Amino acid sequence: MINRRAATVALVVAAMAVTSCGGGKKSGESPSPAVPTATELPGTMILHDDFSSSASGWDVSESDTFSSQYVGGRYRVVAKQRNLFGISSTLYEGPSRPELKQLGEVNVAVTAVGDPANGGLVGLVCRTRGDPNQLDYYGATLSAAGRWAIVRQQGDRRSQLSGGAAPAGIKFGGGPVVLRVECSGSEGDPARIRLYVNGKFLGEGVDSSAWATGGAGFIVASASRGGVVAFLDDFMLSTPQ
């Protein structure tokens, strides 16, 4: 997992530095909360990882900032300190398949739940590219306060394309949420990043100077405090029919 120590700005975390990230579970912790299956994606399914096997290739490690590992058929990520922003992407993790590093128009989905409901953000990314220390991406996040944001990161520059408040009851925390991002627009066209949560359309961000392809993955971030825990399940990718 690529992770960045950051300062909180608006609804997302502004990247400042990058370290490594990993996994672990302490004895005496409560069992993983039940997480429902993500809804079917439109188009042709090209990846469905239910995290039942650690051989599927996502990062398993532990550091001072993050931990991540496969636990009970789910992928568990902990942002240990405040103001951290972690990304796992098929560009560097997951199944070792070249075509998953060159995705243009793609749907990305994951089911997420926090345990306990202790703040932070969860989200999805598409068109990830570049070096881990300078990762470019489009991302969409949902916070524990029920705020959503769609962002563009290129080099050291991060811009928020859109954002707002989700409908009442939709937030990252103790109740499972199904997130889906639709990343559309071909080379030479504007990129359109649309965020859906629990089947509801929350908003869209448009970038007229987009790059064409990259990897896809998910985000776990902390804000004003650490100890943010996310259980992820049923990570899916599909391409247009």
Image (spheres, rainbow, N blue to C red):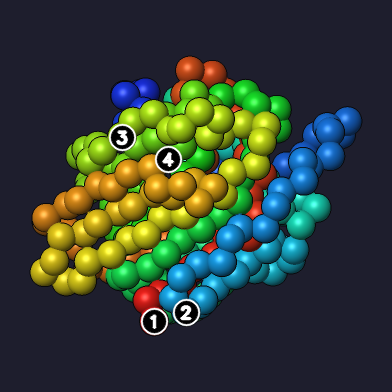
Horizontal side of 32 relative to 195 (left or right) equals right
Q: Disc 1 marks which residue?
A: 241
Q: Residue at x 58, y 60 (%)?
A: 39
For marks 1 and 3, give the CA distance. Answer: 29 Å
For marks 3 and 4, give the CA distance. Answer: 9 Å
For marks 4 and 2, give the CA distance. Answer: 24 Å
Mark 3 or 4, nearer chain start: 4
Q: Secondary structure at mark 4?
A: strand
Horizontal side of 210 relative to 25 (left or right) equals left
The disc placed on residue 141 is 4
The amino acid type of the residue labelled 1 equals: Gln
Q: x, y (%) of residue 186? A: 20, 71
The amino acid type of the residue labelled 2 equals: Thr
Mark 2 or 1, nearer chain start: 2
Horizontal side of 202 relative to 54 (left or right) equals left
The amino acid type of the residue labelled 3 equals: Gly
Mark 1 or 4, nearer chain start: 4
Q: Disc 3 marks which residue?
A: 163
The disc placed on residue 44 is 2
Horizontal side of 230 relative to 152 (left or right) equals right
Q: Secondary structure at mark 1?
A: loop
- Name the outermost residue toward the top: 224
**Residue in the foreground of this view, choosing between 206 and 157:** 206
Q: Residue at x 23, y 41 (%)?
A: 161
Q: x, y (%) of residue 84? A: 46, 31
Q: Are marks 3 and 4 in contact (CB under 8 Å)?
A: no
Residue 65 visible somewhere in the drawing? no
Instruction: Please name which of the two marks, 3 or 4, marks the residue nearer to the observer.
Output: 3
- Please tell me how crowded label 2 is: few (under 14), some (14-19), or many (20+) other residues with Cα within 10 Å: few
**Residue in the foreground of this view, choosing between 151 and 14:** 151
Q: Is residue 148 above or below residue 69?
A: above
Mark 3 or 2, nearer chain start: 2
